[in-house]
Every structure is written in structure tokens, then in C-alpha cells.
């Protein structure tokens, strides 16, 4: 299990089948700096262009179509003291006849205190003096190359992951992606210091990070959609528009997960899901929206 | 503050401007038995027809259009030991090309132990022996008469509330509805012993209850959508299809709430909402879906 | 077959179970003046309030739940020389991030020349000197009382018809509605001199009319959604949001129509529909959108 | 203006930035054989794999980002006497609770008589003896490479065109695509002998063709979405899910077209569009749906 400290000098604006910038073995640990969504690094230097420049692709030796790539997010350390957001709710998350009354949409800075584990506005805003948020880092965009030679902008997401902007994909969680090409070709970037459900101002608190992940191949674990796990939950992730379809994808995937891996009949899975599922809105801003279907582990049958 | 123990002998399948079955004063407490979604009472006797027969309307003296009706849900005591669900995920929550493979959709019984505070399947289902759910009662359908002389089936919901099937509307929570007619005309029923997000099997665990609520008029508090509060959160509720529009309604209402009652500018409200909102899917089954936009009270500015 | 010339002195803003203003026999002809969408009559006098005040309900003797009400639209004669529209595309029909750049939304007058059969702007607008539209009258809102004691605003539509704003419901066409209450309880109003697909400025060219219809009961013709026919086509009408669901309703109803009335198997109906259906967007503005699934009569099997 | 008779020996399942199989000059004519959606050629030999294998990319010399590629569809001659469809309405175009009752979904053959200009079922189907359809060829999938190094499956569509399955893209019509990469990189294939609105059985009548197109560069004509023109209409094409968003894209693009090329103010464009637009549903089956916003040329202001 090697540890790779990798410093990229080029970034990608798509998740696709590109020449790897690095090849690792299954089980290896990767420590990399990530740029913010606009391409700015830890020294506040612009290094790459929008949208969401990615580190990658990282090839994982031995990964083949039909396998799953497991990504354990071990650590995300903010690498500079400033992050930023937009200053208005996005036009698509309010009633259409109210869009005209939304405020100006400008860039706003937030101060990140990595040691204290807090994030707050970098300017005084009336009524928000009390707003000291806990630092809750997450990867806005990560995933693998899609099938068929496709390549998707890092602004959006699909079966291969991508810009899901789902706040549970942070340190301590695990993600799985369906491998569609040899080597899986993993990409990551677009870290957020904090983000509410839905990414409804069009950003989280965008900043640069040092990210540590462990990449492993799970042979023959054929997936359709990304899946995840944290200390207390498992979740299936659907990426699509509208929310209704993203929810259908996530719900169908959870049904498949419970019946294939936990031995439940479709009827038993319905009983369980009907009374215990929780839905999270990852993002309701990007071209594809993200909905997670989540279950507390305590409700899962023994495997 | 009188307490009314009321035993209805007729029920309503719409929320509309009908003759009141009872009139109470603002601040009075109401204790009523509710039928289950199919119209069956505590003695398992069929008393009324589908969908979701309601107790009501209850007129609240002094309520006028432009006021809000505040409903404190004090207590929901299950009044019989059996509840029921459907046995299959609903057709509209899975990918359309997977509908054909859903299991048979039959009625399934659950045992409710009100004293122990638990709910479990009434039959052995492989892999679900461990499934002993905590009793978490909620009102599936409640609300007031809509404006304009309209009357809506208790199968659906709108600005006046109705069949929102949102699990946070349980004991300890408060709901507010926009009053559209003199007396507000309150309806309630369709209690669930437990329900997951989305009501994705088309039911919660449906049963009869004794429900205790306090009804109060908040003069001049003009609302557009239902709002709610529990120990730790406030939430705005949007009812519409698709989920995208329900979410737009809820988000717009929360923006209005923060700017009108908490003194935030639209920009400050955007800063706050962007990083702290949580979205809940009340139901994704009924004709109108329900999405709540929720904020933890600890993030609210002092009023 | 009597002819009723009826002059209403009250109007309704809902389609619901209200006391009839008139009762006719099946096959009778009804000639009535209609107000425009804002409640203004042929003399430009405000007579009733928004939205879309209706003439009705008209009871049709003998109509019972499970029957269909057939409405032949014989004639719509504009009763004043001015109509009006709004001056901007509706916020919900453009990309959300473009709403801010829409023009001011004011009332604009159009001149209607009933004799010449033309409609044109009542003011000079650069680039539109040539715009002399053919008069193509249609009923924006008409239908029957819904089931269950429900009552729906004339701003929206449902299984019982209502504010469908579908331009093929004009003179020479026939509509059928599912009868849900004794007497059917028919309502009509909201005539448009012209309207494009979708009613995307939120109005057609709104004006008052004299309308002549023939109302007949088709016993035992059980319908779910409105249906229609003109010289060359039959069409099923779905009313819902989003467009996807309205289209599902219309498509399902056409499948049912072809299999029940035209003797096709579901497979044969699929063959036919797949290659010959046309979809029309009635409205994409009202609370419920309207989509028609339409087939040219020349492709129908002999009945 | 050269004419290129080109016979491909490899095909693409994505629209992306790939090495050109041919380079032509602006204004050149291209005559190529196309495979059917499943990859079968004029001799009924399987030559390539699904989905929708494309001829291309064809580079057009001089095309640069910010230009438009104009494609005049001159001729589509069916190259074999058999086409095929699926035998059931797609699951996503009917009400979800009706999916279970759809018929079996098998491959069905149709006979194409190119000389007579007719298409009919190749087997006897009760009730459809009369069904002799006029041959109305169209290109289901065509377009250019998207921006950013993206590559999209030929199953779907986006700003760069692709699998729009819009029946007005047939002989005699012109399409324009936004050029995003040097040479534009044009792809075409997936011809249909006939197709109804929406492609609701998941196919048109799929067959192989000889296609003749003229490719020209319009310098500096910056587009966002595909546009088209036939003898009587112009149309803007939006590709997205749900239909509501596809319609928003198409409507916004038509507004831009009328204001930029026809000199109308946004108000004048609203007046015109409100009363004369027609919406077509290209497809309501593929991952992205297609809606066209169409205007009859007789209503356009002089340019």
C-alpha cells in the first residue's frame, strides 16, 4: 500500500478517457492538492480554468469494466484561509415570477479557520454576526471516466459521478463508482468548506484543499450509479434532471442494493425502504441534479 | 382555553368551505379520534370512505382571511394495535423501465405497541426479523379550507395544506396555515405510526389515533404556504409537482420568512440559506409532491 | 332540441358542484355571452372578478356519473372590437437565468375585426406592421364539475377540463368530459380571439364572445380525461405539471381510446401511435399544463 | 463546391473531438451511406454497434468556435426495403401505474417502398390493414462535436445536436449547429423512414439510407442551440429533461433569434411569439428530450 504525494501541473475540465497523470495500485493512498472551482490554488494563484478543474485522471491498476472503484475520503485539509460563494439564491430554485426580485449575484469571501474548524463571512453582514459555521469539507466533483468514450464536463454529473455537490461525500465517507474503462481513471477536485443541501447559491464555500484518499478496486462489483457510506448510513446516488428522475435512479439503485447484497426480496426491500429511507438533495443547481436515497445502517439486515 | 373532546359522526373527503362540525375559540384544545386512510376506526370498523376521511371542518372563531391558523400537535396516541402499508414501492418512484419488475402490491399489517413505542411487521418476512421501528406518529393530511370556494380532495395538497404526508408534522411540532375563509375551517386525519421520506410505498403505517391539538389564530400573519416548527428547526413547505416546483415554492417561502420576520436582507438570507438549508421530501407519491426547506434554529438571527 | 338564449347575471370562479343557473335537455343548444378573462363584458363593463369568470353551472338533465358530456362548439362570435394580452413572455417559459432580462409585463390591446376575420395590435409596434392574424376563436376554460365534491379554480385544469387553454377547442370542434355529478354541471368562458401554442405570454387575445354550443349526454361512455375531435383529428387531453406528466396522461388516454373504441390490441395501438401521433402543447403557463395527443382521422381503423 | 461520395469503414458512438474521417470545404456536398440505429447496413449486414453508429466526424475546413455549421439535407434515399420498430409504447410515456399493462416489446418489421414512397407493416396486424404511411425520411441523430473536449453518446442530445429524433429534420430542411471546435466535426446517422412526434415506441422506422447533405460554414454566427428551417417555418431546438426545460431552451433561443436577426424588441418578440408559436415534441424517449419552438415564415418581419 504505497502513498503517493502527487502535485499536478495540468488539470481537466472533463471526466473522460484521457492519458493518466499517475497510475497507482489498488489500495494505494493518494495525497493531492486541489484547486477551487474557479481554478485557484492554495497561494491564491489562478492555475486552471473553469469549470471545476480536476486532478486526474489517476489510473488504478487492474480496474476493469464491471468492477467498482472504492474511494475512501480520509482527509480534506483546507489549504488557504479564504473561500468564496455567490451572493444570491440561484434563479432556478425560486418561483419563476420571483426571479426578478433576487439580489445582485456577486462573489463573497468567507474566512476559514482550519485549526478552529470554523468558517465565517469575511465581511460584516447585518443579522449574520452569529454565523460561525463548523468546517464540514466535502468533494463537490469526483468520479471516473464514463463508458463508450464519452467525456462529460465537470459542471455536471452522471452514472460515473462528477459534479454531484453532495455534502455527505466528505472525510470519513466512502464512495463507489462503476468502472467503465481499464484503470477506472479517477478524477477529483472542487472542494467545499461547507455547503447546504442543494447548493442553492450555485456554490458551496469554494476553496483549495489537500485531499487524502485511498483508491481500491472491488473486482466484479458491477454498479450502475455511485454509492456511498458514512459512519451511520449507506446511500445510493442518482444524477439527472428533474429531481423526480434523480430520485427514481437513486431509489431503484437502493432497491437493487438491498436485494442483491442484503438478501432481501423486493417485497421485503419495499417494506424496509417505505418506512426508513431518507432523501437528500445533493445539488439542485448543476445541469444534472443529485438525489441520494439513504438508509441508517442500524436498519440493514445482517449480510 | 377550553378543551373539546369531540367525537365526529361524519367525515370529509375534501378540504373546502363546508358547514363546521364544531366551532372553537382561538387557543382551545381539541381532542378527537381519527380514522385511518381507508376510513377504519379504533374498533376496526369501516366508518367512512377513501381517500383519507377527515375530521372537520372545525371553525376557529375570529379567524379571517389574511390571518394564520397555528396548530400545535400536542399528542397522537394510536388507538388500535394494527396498522397497514402497501407491499411494493410505488410505480412512480423507480425508473419507468423497472416498473414491470416491482413485486405484487398488497396490504400488509404491522403491530403497534403504543406502550413500548414500537412498530413491527405482523408477519415473518425473511431478513426483517430485526426491524422494530420506533413509533413516530405524524398527521398525513391536515389543513384548512382553500380560497375562492375551492375544495380539494384529501388525496392531494396545496397552499392550504392537505395530504402533505410529511413526517415532521408529528407531536411536538407546530404547523401554520394561511387562513382563506372566515373561521379558517380546519381538517385533520390520516395518521401514520411511522413513515419514511417520500411515502414511497404509497402509505405510511396507516392507523387510527386519538389526536390532541391546540388551535390558535395569529391575526394578520399573512402566509402563502404552510410553515412548521419543531424543537430544533423551522421549515417552509411547498406542495406541487414535480419535486422541482415544490422545492421552488418552499425555498421562496423560506426566503420570504427570513426577510420579513428575521430582518435579513435578501443577500443575507441567501448567504444563510446557501450554507445551512436542509431539504426534506415529504411525499413523492400523491398528486402534489411535498418538499420542506428546513433550517436549524441555532442558525437563525435573533428576532 | 330547444335553443336557450341565456344571459347570466352571476359567474363562477370555480368548477364545482354549485346550484345550476340553467337546466337544459340533452341535445339542446345554448347561446350565451361570455366575459373576458378579467371579467369584462361586450360593453367593456367589469361584471365579475378574476380568474376567468365562468357562465354556469348549466345542468344537463339525465347526465349521471359514468356518462360523458359532449360539447359541440358551434360558433364563437367576438362581441367587442378590443382584446388584450400581456406584453412579455411568462417567466416560466424561458431559461431561469434569463428571466431578469424579460421586458415589462403590461396590458396590450388588439383590434378584432369580426367581419374581416382578423386581429391586429391596436398600437404601432416596430417590426410588426405586417402582423394581421386570422381570427381563430377558442374557449380557454370550459368543463364540468369534478368528482368528490371538489371545486377547482378556473385558473387551472384537471380531469374535468377547466383552464386548458388549448387552441383546438374552437368552433367546429367537439369536446367530451367525464361526468362526475348528476347533471354534469357545465361551465364555460375565457374566450380567446387567437392564441399560440402554450399561451406563453400568459394570455391569448382575451375578449368577450357570444358562444353557441350543443350539449349532449353520451350514456355510459366512461372517460378519465377530456377528449376532442375536429374536422381532421381526434385528441386526448392531459392536464398536469410538468409537461411530462400531462403527456403521460394524454398518451395513456389515447391508448385506451384506440383499444376500447377502435378494436386495436395494445400492440397495434403502439404501432399506430408510434408513427402517427402529434403532440400539442395547450398551455405551459397555468398551474396545470395541458398536452394533447392527436391523431389524424385518416389513420384510424374503421370502428 | 465539390461533391464527396464517401464510404465509411468505421463509425462512432459518440459526438466528440475525434480524428476526422474526411475533410471537406465549406459548401461541399457529401453523399454517404448511413447504418440503421442498430448498426446494420443496406445489405442487412451488421457493421457497427449500438447506439446509433455515426458517420464521422467530417471536418469542414475553416469552421471555428463561434461560427455556425449549416447543414442542408438534400436527399435521404432508403437503401433497403426493410425497417424496424419496437412493438410497445415506451414505459416513460404512459402513466407509471399503467406500465405493467403495456404489451411485449419486440422488434417489428416494416416494408419500405422507396419508389412508391410508402411504408407499411411487414406482417398482418388486426385493424391496421389500411396503414400505408407516406415515406417521410428524417435524420434521428446528427450534429457536431461539443465544447470543452466533451463527448456525448449518440443516444442523447445537447447543445451540439445529437439524437434529437425530430421529424422535421428531413430532406428539404436546413439545420444549424454551434461550432465548438476547429473544423466543426460533423456526424450523421440513425435515419428513420417515418416517425411520429416523441418517438414514443423508442424508435422511428429504423433503416439504412443514402444521405446527401451540403455543409457550409457561417462565419461569426454564434449559436447556443441547434436551429432549423424548412419551406414554411423556422425553429429553435432545445434538448434537455424534462420537457419543461427543453421548452425553456427552445423558447429562449427563439426570443434571441427574433431580437438579434429580425430586429424585434423583446416586447415585440413576445407579442409575436405569444400568438403564433407552435411547439413540437421531437422525442420524449431519449436521455435528453427535444422540443422545437417553431414559427411560420409568413409571420416573420422582413430582415
Image (spheres, coloured by chain):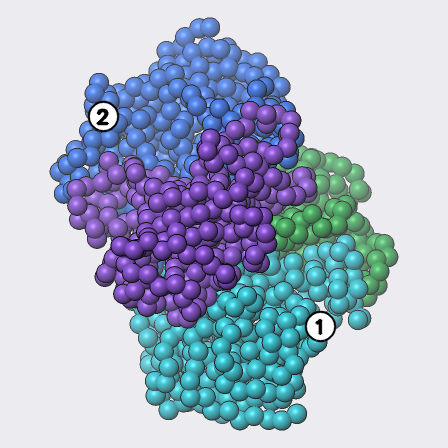
Chain colours: A cyan, B green, C blue, D purple
Q: Are marks 2 and 1 on the same chain?
A: no
Q: Nearer the viewer, residue A85 or B232?
A: A85
**Quadrant position of residue A44:** bottom left
The answer to whether B108 appears left or right of C271 in the picture is right
Give the residue number, with chain letter if any, for mark 1.
Answer: A220
- How many numbered marks are there? 2
Q: Is residue A241 above or below residue A231?
A: above
Q: Which residue is mark 2?
A: C118
Image point (46%, 30%), residue name: D116
C10 sits to left or right of B239: left
The mark lying in front, picked from 2 and 1, is 1
The foreground one among D238 and A84 is: D238
Q: Secondary structure at mark 1?
A: loop
- Residue A290, percent across and down? 53, 64
Return the x and y of residue C52 as percentages of the image width and height.
37, 32
- The chain holding disc 1 is A
Residue B43 drawn above or below residue A240: above
Q: Chain of mark 2?
A: C
- Furthest toward the top, the residue is C1
Q: Could one spot residue D106 in this view of the protein? A: yes
Q: Tag 1: Cα neighbours inside 10 Å, few (<14), some, or many (≥20)?
A: few
**Does C286 sit left or right of D86 as displayed?**
left
Query: Would residue A139 appear left or right of C165 to someone viewing this image?
Result: right
Q: Residues under labels 2 and 1: Cα distance?
A: 69 Å
* Residue occupying the point 20% across, 31% down: C132
Q: Label 2, secondary structure: give it.
A: strand
Between B69 and A212, the one lying in front of the other is A212
Q: Answer above or below: position of C158 versus B189.
A: above
Q: Quadrant of the C terminus of chain D?
A: top left
Amino acid at each position: 500500500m504505497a502513498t503517493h504525494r502527487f502535485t499536478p501541473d495540468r488539470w481537466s475540465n472533463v471526466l473522460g478517457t484521457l492519458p493518466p497523470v499517475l497510475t497507482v495500485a489498488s489500495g494505494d493512498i493518494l495525497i493531492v492538492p486541489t484547486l477551487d472551482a474557479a481554478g485557484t490554488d492554495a497561494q491564491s494563484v489562478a492555475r486552471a480554468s473553469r469549470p471545476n478543474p480536476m486532478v486526474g485522471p489517476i489510473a488504478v491498476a487492474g480496474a476493469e469494466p464491471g468492477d467498482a472503484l472504492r474511494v475512501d475520503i480520509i482527509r480534506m485539509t483546507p489549504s488557504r484561509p479564504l473561500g468564496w460563494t455567490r451572493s444570491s439564491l440561484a434563479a432556478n430554485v425560486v418561483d419563476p415570477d420571483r426571479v426578478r426580485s433576487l439580489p445582485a449575484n456577486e462573489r463573497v469571501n468567507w474566512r476559514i479557520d482550519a485549526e478552529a474548524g470554523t468558517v465565517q463571512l469575511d465581511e460584516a453582514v447585518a443579522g449574520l454576526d452569529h454565523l460561525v459555521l463548523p468546517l464540514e469539507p466535502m468533494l463537490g466533483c469526483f468520479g471516473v471516466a464514463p463508458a463508450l468514450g464519452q467525456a462529460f464536463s465537470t459542471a455536471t454529473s452522471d452514472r460515473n459521478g462528477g459534479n454531484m455537490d453532495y455534502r455527505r461525500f466528505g472525510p470519513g465517507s466512502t464512495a463507489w463508482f462503476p468502472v467503465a474503462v481499464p484503470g477506472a481513471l479517477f478524477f477529483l477536485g472542487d472542494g467545499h468548506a461547507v455547503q447546504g443541501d442543494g447548493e442553492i447559491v450555485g456554490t458551496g464555500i469554494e476553496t483549495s484543499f489537500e485531499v487524502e484518499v485511498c483508491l481500491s478496486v472491488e473486482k466484479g462489483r458491477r454498479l450502475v450509479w455511485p454509492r456511498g457510506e458514512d459512519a451511520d448510513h449507506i446511500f445510493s446516488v442518482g444524477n439527472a434532471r428533474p429531481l423526480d428522475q434523480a430520485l427514481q435512479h437513486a431509489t431503484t439503485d437502493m432497491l437493487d442494493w438491498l436485494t442483491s447484497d442484503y438478501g432481501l426480496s423486493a417485497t421485503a426491500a419495499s417494506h424496509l425502504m417505505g418506512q426508513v429511507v431518507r432523501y437528500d438533495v445533493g445539488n439542485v443547481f448543476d445541469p444534472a441534479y443529485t438525489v441520494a436515497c439513504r438508509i441508517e445502517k442500524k436498519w440493514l439486515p445482517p449480510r
